[in-house]
Image (cartoon, coloured by chain):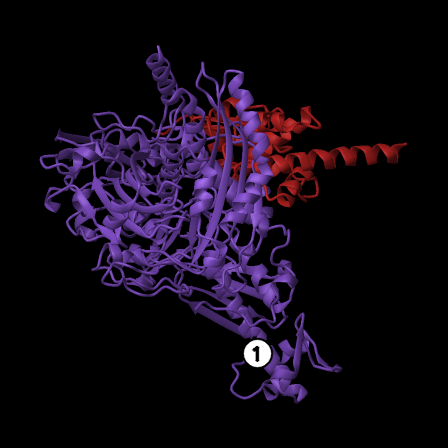
Amino acid sequence: MSEKLYAVTLDVNGKLCTAHVPARLSLVDCLRDELRLTGTHIGCEHGICGACSVLLDGEPVRSCLMFAVQADGHKVTTVEGLANADGTPGVLQDSFCEKHALQCGYCTPGMLIAAHALLQIVAQPTDEQIREAIGGNLCRCTGYQQIVDAVKHAAARLANDNSSAADKRR
Amino acid sequence: MGFKLKTDLNPQNFRYIGKHRRTKEDPRFVTGRGRYVADIALAGMKHVALVASPYPSARILSIKTDAALALPGVHYVLTGEEFCAATDALAIGVDAPKVARYSLANGVVRYAGEWVAAVVADTRAIAEDAAELVEVEYEPTPHVIDPEEAVKDGSPLVHPAHGSNVILKKHFKWGPVEDAFARAKHKLSLRAVWGRSSTVPIETFGVAAQWDAGQQILDIWASIQMPKFPDQAARALRLPGNAVRVHFDVDVGGSYGVKRGIKHTVLVGYLAKRLGMPVRLIEDRLENMRGGDMHGPDRIFDMQIAFDHDGTLRGLKIRALDDVGAYAGRSPFQLGKPVTAICGPYRIAAIEYEPTAVLTNKTPEEAVRGFGQAPTNFALERTIDCVARHLKMNPIEVRRKNLIRKEEFPYLIPSGSTYDSGDYHTVLDKALNAIDYPALVKERDSARRAGKLAGIGISACLEPNGGNSGFEPLLNPKNDTTTWMDSCVVRVDLSGAITGVMGTSSSGQGHETLVSTVIGEVLEREPGDIRVVRADSLQALPSNSPVGSRMAIMLGGAAAGAARKIKDTLIEIAAHNLKCTIESIEYSEGNASVRGHPDQRMTWDELIAIAHRKIHQMPPGIEPGLQAKFVWEVPTGGKLPAADNTVQIYPCYSFEAHVVYVEIDPDTAAPVLRKYVCGHDCGVMITPDIVHGMTYGGIAHGIGAALYEKFSYTADGQLESGTFMDYLLPSAMEVPTITIVDHCTPSPLTTFGQKGSGEAGYLGAPAAIANAINDALAPINARIDTLPITHDALWQVIRGAASSRN
């Protein structure tokens, strides 16, 4: 006798996806194994390391601590959805490359989600604000220094883009 | 002597080396397109969950698997009875053949968390449900947790057949030790304890294997960082070496030494072959912390030092007791590697070293970043600070007096290794200037007046690198391994595109960037256009993997060597076609012309076309096509120890000087690192961004080891800190802003003057932080020499000092 399956429909990175999953399946396992979006990673399965961070309706959550069925009908953004519409890396991702804000890349998707969420609400964050925003994302490679540098770099570039876009509109 | 290119490469004129450059690896990771082992889905793949022992020591009386096998979706339940008869024991480096280790317990369990049975099912969830249905009957037996108890006669024995719990015990004396201690005006002794911690990567270990019965080949994908991995897997599985194919193009999510899952791999490889299905094991975090066998050094140092009244160090005695856990692979060798830098960066002529490795009923240790150097540096630096305190001298002055001077290099240390180059005084000065030491002293004193405990800590530490095995024969004369080569292939295809081929995995060190930068430098072609691929273990030239901070030297050197052969071939083809001598050819960016006659020129495309298609225009005796391999041994290595136990181990020595400022709230005892500067010299940096990144990361690891991280055991042998709730990894809130100041003393032994640098930061941070905390405690006459210096431990020490004042 197999487990009862529930249909869940998620808007993942702007695309509606349906999966049939047991109640106990975590959101991260659903994203990785059912939807084959393997960019989101598993590090602890008890909500501390942050490698599994995704945006749920725009807010960062630990997808290892959520069931897929809880996300039914909601909007999920993963690292795969942070790129520009044409598939090129977004400003934040590009700044991570410019400042070498990663090494093994395993914590990086979660780190990008946390940083992205910060920049949505604080356009020019201080070092303290950045460290607090990524304080729930553990990294064992970088010591966080180049990550903080990258987020500041991205913030500055986004401010420039905004002001030059504003100039263009004038 | 090491491999050096001719002097047409002037360090002042590097085109690519030493410059800011985006790595090749970062783009795939920031877009979520890494390929880690858990991302690999083999068709029909099955999943493993483990049944683990709850007891630290017990006999296994019976294992009932019926209920587990009856669960739909379960394919097999494997126990040690079958497994240990069908495979060979895992390799052990020291002379202890009776300390046999298998992936599954063989009749007895020796630590809480040891794997007793493996369940294979359609999904990991079903495998876990089935694992709970496996019934194991145990008869607990006496256990031992304390290493100082374990060395005593009468202690419970972890491996009775071995006859004792001591798996390694050596006694080395280099130089006139007793004489130095007899003559010195002052002596002091101290105990310094390095707590059991590890590098704990965010990705746990994982391995997938698939047996192809038709071709009789086992394919393995693993999150691996391990020398001799394919060979050891084949040997344990009783397969010929060419029946195992390890795929090194798997992205490894951090390792820093510990991802040596040979136990996991032999288990999964056996299951895949036995069942005829692809099988995968991804450790969950609980399995990883307790049963993954990746704990780091757990070491008690008893130090004695003899010194003059002016602070000159005369003699050093080190006794080190390391608790390796219930089994051993290469972990006891972590007592041997520090022999290559046993006196640290100091001029000490007489040294005695007594390393002992003891077994206890704990999770086994594995190789950790630095391979024993970080604990040793910590013990030595605490000793130096204690000398300073004893003499009421500034710890900086004691160091300045004893640091090996720039003009003394190359410097032979009493244990037989030669330090290649360095300028320790300048690096220390640079660090002190960067933090503005005089102002920092004022800041500390002002904080003290305001009621805080505040301290400045210094450390001056070596990072030996180049990674060979020179300590193996020293610790085990039956182990006569002296070769630790590495290699690279470079090919230029018919279109003129360049590809470098390396034969090992990477875990964030940026080797693709390293290899392409080096090849680009030699051939004067844009590294961004050079592709780097990884051969699998059947195609690869020999490699000993990225350990011992060796890849900049060894892989960098091999890539340069192969690229140089390509360049020489192009020059020969040009000379032959331009009808001149090789010496008259001027090579520039892949094009070749006759010196003084720039109109007599051949382009890269022309030269490639000749090499690949026009053998009638090739010089005689040159291979057609355009490809070269380079395999070489670690410079200066390759010798067995002398009768007096001296041996040349690692070739190159990077140096780091840390200056840390800490404030401790006297009421809550919370330590806060307020300022952090690291002076760093690793010779020529091939990609500075990569080097800096690893140094920042190493410092963060060091902060964890110094203040937060411990695998803590109860008296009844249970791991108390088996999750991230209790094993505390530093976040961006615990790691301060770090300033690195660079210095460069090139190595005379390497291709571009580069030294290795993967272990930087971790080797010096715990020492500096411990010294800072002790400086902060000095005004209240308190002291703490045991790591980690947890919040609670600090609180106890501060309360204790307060009550002894009252």
Task: Kindly state the secondary structure of the residue where label 1 is placed.
Answer: helix
Using residue B116 as the reference point, say whether residue B705 is left or right of it.
Answer: right
Using residue A134 as the reference point, say whether residue B106 is left or right of it.
Answer: left
Asked if residue B290 is positioned above or below residue B20 in the image, the reply reads above
The chain letter for the residue carrying disc 1 is B
How packed mark 1 is, by other alpha carbons closer than 10 Å (few <14, some 14-19, many 20 or more), is many
Q: Colour of chain A?
A: red
Quadrant of image for the N terminus of chain B: bottom left
**Image x and y of residue B521, in percent:** 61, 64
Asked if residue B375 is positioned above or below residue B588 in the image, the reply reads above
Q: Amino acid at mark 1?
A: Thr
Q: Nearer the viewer, residue A57 or B388?
A: B388
**Image x and y of residue B181, in percent:** 26, 45
Q: Which residue is mark 1?
A: B569
Q: Nearer the viewer, residue B555 or B375?
A: B375
Q: Image point 19% across, 37% down: which residue?
A: B110
